[in-house]
Amino acid sequence: MNACVVYDCLYPHTVGGAERWYRNLSERLAAEGHEVTYLTLRQWTRDAEPRVTGVAVRAVGPRFELYRRGRRRTLPPLVFGMGVLVHLLARGRRYDVVHMASFPYFSVLAAAAARRIHGFELIVDWHEVWSKEYWHDYLGKAGGMVGWLVQRSCARVRQRAFCFSRLHAGRLRASGLRGPVTVLRGQYAESPTPTGDEGREPLIVFAGRHIPEKRVCTIVPALARARQQAPDLRAEIYGDGPDRHKLASLVREERLSDVVSVPGFVDASDVDAALRRALCMVLPSVREGYGRIVVEAAARGTPSVVVRAPDNAATELVEDGVNGVIASSAEPGDLGRAILRVHDSAPELRASTRAWFKRNARDLSLTNSLDIVTRCYREG
């Protein structure tokens, strides 16, 4: 089989869940003996061409700054969509399958146009399906309406669809999807190695981008409130982004410099070590397409605190009181109370988190998701 994988980012040149997913998918297909081409934007210098084992990486657009003030720019998706269209019009006849991310949308429309000529199968992963309200918040009323209409147009393209949450699968069906949709629960690629209670500290950990949707800045006042009842609590907040300066200012304002560490991006081994000794992982995000860090924490026997919100699919990975706590909002008071619930039942919650992960490990594994996808390839 000849497959074309399409995403405008390539791991590790950019880091994120989708980047890892498409890299792993490409390598898995190549390892099974398929011919694989990966279309992306150039994110590397010409003297450092990317090497993905068994995969031909093709840049169909130049280097761009993809984000501005924590949000995706408009120009790169347009250029990428045009590059995908040109490539598929010229070479689409060689592909049996084109497998792509729904975002950044214009590439889906490009693939749908080229399929009319070449007839390849189109598979689309919907990591998120935004509501009309969220589009308006993100781009304003006029821009949001355009974005929502483009998203809906992509949903109505004939395709084989995959989602990573029930939330977004339901939204995709409601958008007029023409074809089946399968929910993939697994993105965890490591061997499960849950950690016991030895070496645990009264530590809360966050790891992710410091952007408005993640609500990382709420961790500091939430910790300040929780420390009124549990003064031993500390925090380590990993990652970077446009909200990092605000975060550092809040640490100073709350006089928590001695108990809150904000080291920026660090090696994955450092985050792993922090999760293994943590009381809990805190993810105050109000918008998540999946929430893989919840699974990564549970694999180490560490419960999570997540937030109930209309656009947050990470709540599907948490059974309240079993492998974590679902806070009623990202407000500091609600988040602080959720942290205290973990603090007050720490040994029992860690034990039930380990048991939860053991029950769900197969479904949550990247291998299981890749098995499902490649089986769909073979079935046609």
Image (tube, helix red, strand yellow):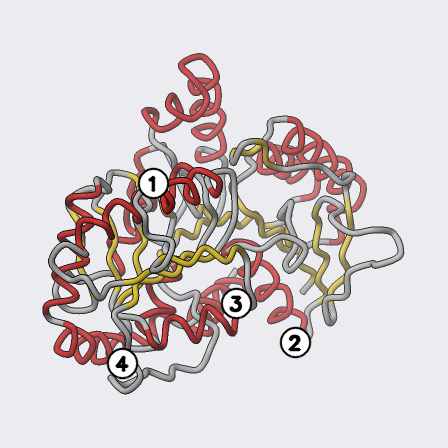
Q: State the mark number for residue 253.
A: 1
Q: Secondary structure at mark 3?
A: helix
Q: Residues within 10 Å of mark 3 (few under 14, many from 20)?
A: some
Residue 156 at x, y = what percent? 45, 33
Quadrant housing residue 324: bottom left
Residue flagged by tag 1: what amino acid is it? Glu
Residue nearest the observer in this picture, 307 or 25 = 307
Residue 356 at x, y = what percent? 22, 75
- The residue most toward the top is 142
Residue flagged by tag 3: what amino acid is it? Thr
The CA span between labels 3 and 4 is: 25 Å
Mark 3 or mark 1: whose residue is earlier in sequence: 1
The residue that appears at 43% across and 65% down in the rendered structure is 187
- The residue most toward the right is 47
Mark 1 or mark 2: whose residue is earlier in sequence: 2
Residue flagged by tag 2: what amino acid is it? Ala
For the image shown, how many numbered marks are present on the structure? Answer: 4
Q: State the mark number for residue 136.
A: none
The CA span between labels 3 and 1 is: 52 Å
Q: State the mark number for residue 31.
A: 2
The CA span between labels 4 and 1 is: 42 Å
Name the residue tied to disc 4.
358
Q: State the mark number for residue 374.
A: 3
Camera-nearest label, 4 or 1: 1
The CA span between labels 2 and 3 is: 12 Å
